[in-house]
Image: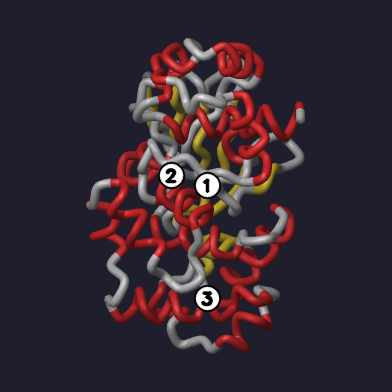
Amino acid sequence: MRVEYTQNDVVVSDVECLDLDLTLDCGQAFRWEKQDDGSYSGVAGGYFLNISKNENGDLIFRNTDRDSFEGFFRNYFDLDKDYKKICETLKQDELLSSTIDEYYGIRILNQEPWEALCSFVISQQNNIKRIKLIISRLCAAYGDEVADGWYSFPSAERLSALTTEDFEALGCGYRAKYLERLSKDVASGKIDLEKIKSLPLEEARKELLNIYGVGIKVANCALLFGFQFYSAFPVDVWMKRVMEYYPDGLPKCFDGIEGIAQQYLFHWARNNL
């Protein structure tokens, strides 16, 4: 991987396995919007970003400087992880071998724990379009404007002042009471997200399952997409169908990277089952 810093942009070359459509519009993050020119715009870590690929396959991080790239986006897109090697390992499985060939380029984003946990609480019994709309309203109402019309994800401290009715006004429905309690408990320190991130997987999962309104699917999604537990394996209705192809359990080549395997299998299921 090569990184070039220009006056206003950062250009990253020779990145293996990063398809913007498959990564930013696959249901793991909800703040990215595809633009008419094929690029994506969104807010992550309090930074606005427009990202695209040029004809040479280089990633163009627009209006990004060295500090924000090195301090946040390099890790957010997990650019130093060897996804080519990971995919070669996963292709030892027959189903994933053809799936990776067809959908090569899915990458797990390293999202912030707070935003990921809130987002997946909102995602319960919801579709992606509606999840994005609710989160957009939440950010516009209580986040900070970081670019024209683009807002940061509000902190737990900011949201802890809200009532259930305030969350309901954003369209959160029955999830409003979960978000109110979660915000207050994180802001007060009753829930320590950094501590959870430092625990072994099973202990971290247990801590998340103790949170009001968090079930096993939300916990595993948060662990994978917000706490960087790559062995977490979220199971929804699509993945239940996929598991019929693995009656003896997941193959050994998935060990430690079950979550990355899950993303490929999930995408395959949505397109083929």
**Closer to the N terminus: mark 2 or mark 3?**
3
- Distance from the alpha carbon under mark 1 to that under mark 3: 30 Å
Q: Is residue 65 visible?
A: no
- Residue 148: x %, y % from top left: 61, 62
Q: Which mark is residue 49?
A: 1
Give the secondary structure at mark 3.
helix
Identify the residue at the far front of this view. Answer: 248
User: In the drawing, does residue 117 fall left or right of residue 131?
Assistant: left
Vertical position of residue 32 compared to residue 269: above or below: below
Q: Earlier in the sequence, mark 1 or mark 3?
A: 1
Instruction: Examine the rendered structure and indicate whether residue 83 appears above or below residue 216.
Output: above
115 vs 73, nearest the viewer: 115
Quadrant location of residue 172? bottom right
Lower sequence index among marks 1 and 2? 1
Location of mark 2 (residue)? 224
Image quadrant occupied by the C terminus: top right
Where on the picture, by quarter, is residue 258?
top left
Instruction: Rate crowding at label 2 as few (under 14), some (14 to 19) or many (20 or more) other CA atoms within 10 Å.
Output: many
Residue pointed to by mark 3: 178
Q: Within 10 angstroms of label 3, few (less than 14), some, or many (20 or more) residues? A: some
Image point (53%, 33%), residue name: 262
Side of 206 where 234 appears, left or right: right
The quadrant holding residue 247 is top right
Q: Are marks 1 and 2 in contact (CB under 8 Å)?
A: no
Residue type at mark 2? Leu
